[in-house]
Structures are given as C-alpha cells and as structure tokens.
Amino acid sequence: MDLRQLRYFLAVARAGSFSRAAASENISQPALSEQIRKLEGSLGVALFERLARGVRLTPAGQRLLVHARQILREMSDARQSLEALRTCVAGRLAVGVIPTVFPYLLAPRVEEFRRTHPEVELRLVEDITARLVESLLAGDLDLAVVSLPLRAPDLICAEILREPLLVALPPGHPLAREKEVDPRALRGERWLILRDGHCFRDEVLALCRRALRQTDSIFETDQFASIVALVAAGFGVSVLPAMAARQAGGCRLVPLRGTAHRRIGYARVRRAFVPPAQIAFAEWLRNIAREAPDARP
C-alpha cells in the first residue's frame, strides 16, 4: 500500500466510478483499476462493489476511507509544515468557495491577496457546500468559504460576516416601493430559487416555511443571473443576498422585515499545524468582509 494507491482509492470513492476517477487523476482507467486491484490484493479485502453503473464502497472500503483521509491529511500537513519553515507565507493554498459568494465577495478582490503574497500559489475552486466539505476532508482543499452553520465534527468554522437577505421584485410589483417587506406579504407569489444542492436554496426555503407555509417554486437554476432576468421580466419573485445587489439590474430589491440574514464564514480541517499562507488568507477574508457593503462582521 502506497500513498498513490490511497489517493486513487479516495478519487474512486468520491467519484463513484473508475472512469470519472481516472479522468480527475489524469490517468487511464486501466492504470487506475490496476492500482486499486493491487491495493485490494495487499490488504486482502475488496474495497469496492462493482455495480452496473459505477462502484460502491464495501464495509472494508468504508473503514479504509477514514484512515486514508487521515494519512493523506497528515502527509499534506508534513509537506506544508516543512514548506512553511523554508518560505514563510508561501506554498500551495487551495481555497473553495460557494457560487453564491465567489463572484461577489472574492472574485473582485482576490488579486489583492495575490499581490500582497506573491509567493503563495493560490488555487480557487467554486462548488456547492457538500462537495467543498468532501474536498476539505479529503485534503484537496485547505480552506472553504461557505454559509454557516456547517455541521462536520472534523472541521473548524469561523464566521466573517452576516449578510441581509433582500426580496427581489419586478419594478411594477405592488410591494416594490415599500421600505421593507414582511415575508408574510409574499404568500401566493411565484417563487424563483436556486437548484437543490445550493445552501442558499435551503435558507430561502426555510424562510418560506417559517413565514409563508409555502415551498413551491416555478423555476430552479444554478445561478442568480437567470433569477434576476426573470424577476426583472415580471415572471416571479425571489430572495437574494445583499452582496448580489449590484448585479440585480432591472429588479427592485427591498429588505425583508425582521432579522433575515445569512452567515458567511470559512471552514478548515481541525489540525495542529496551520500553514502561514492559510492564516494570511483567513485574515484577508476577515478584512474584505469588514469592508463589504451592508455586511455585519
């Protein structure tokens, strides 16, 4: 058993497929399959059940998954610890960000971090929360910017801002000129929301259930741009985070009455050594959060 085999094992476990795992690791499927067979042979157990459309972890595979993640995390820690001793705030840093935050908070300013810390090799990934958490636990990411709370015992989370939620209305809507809107006044509206998997969808649905006793939607998408276009055209209403307001042209955005907000923060794996580059990026996040319009750090 070697580290390369463990990395391939984790790739197959994440992808649920040898072909997808091979593509993600940039090797041929036969070569990856051979390494998994060698790993299973050295351990004397089957790690995957081969199914018609993919693979599934066996009980032995599920047990190895925990240890494999820990081994690769510790190896990553060792590399980063030695790298930090040699170069201080430098080295590789992989950061994941949810799609409802990345284009509004990080993308416009991330070049500032790169200029301040040119020795950091920064890699950015945009994805939904579930896959970011999976990548954190697998050691593929060092930090993830997500919506809180996040329930994962192996992760440490820190809040950086609280952001108001705004109702997005067509310009001619009867509530468009109000200074604030009671969520209950939106009962019976045609709702436009993000697709399943986005944490912001869950926050909007929770608001609907509490105030409206309503969860039906007429349109679901992966991006706010489509929602904004439909709201502006009068097709329905939605809820947007305040940081998306600048890209909501054609809509009337009105604050929701009460304490409607979302919590944004970062998560990292619980470990003894935190590389200086990761500490510097977390501090930079806190700084830009304090400067974000309408945010409450």
Image: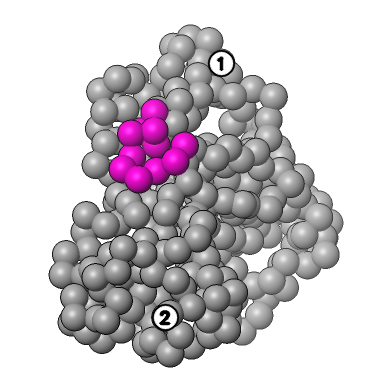
In the rendered image, residue 18, in percent from the top left (x then y), is placed at 55, 66
Residue contact between numbered discs 2 and 1, judged by CB atoms under 8 Å? no
- Let me know if residue 288 is in the magenta part: yes
In the rendered image, residue 128, in percent from the top left (x then y), is placed at 47, 60
Q: Secondary structure at mark 2?
A: helix
In the rendered image, residue 136, in percent from the top left (x then y), is placed at 57, 45
**Quadrant hosting residue 14:** bottom right
Q: Which mark is residue 82?
A: 1
Label 2 neighbourhood size at 10 Å, few (<14), some (14-19), many (20+)? some
* Nearer mark to the viewer, of 2 and 1: 2
Distance, label 2 to label 1, CA atoms, is: 56 Å
Q: Amino acid at mark 2?
A: Leu
Q: Amino acid at mark 1?
A: Leu
**Quadrant hosting residue 35:** bottom right
Q: Is residue 243 left or right of residue 134?
A: left
In the rendered image, residue 52, in percent from the top left (x then y), is placed at 61, 84
The colour scheme is: one colour
Count of numbered marks: 2
Q: Is residue 275 visible?
A: yes
Q: Is residue 224 visible?
A: no
Q: Which residue is mark 2?
A: 186
Q: Nearer the viewer, residue 79 or 90?
A: 90
**Magenta stretch in the rendered image:** 287-297
Q: Residue at x 68, y 53 (%)?
A: 151
Q: Is residue 41 left or right of residue 176?
A: right
Q: Nearer the viewer, residue 76 or 168?
A: 168
Q: Is residue 228 left or right of residue 295?
A: left
Q: Which mark is residue 153?
A: none
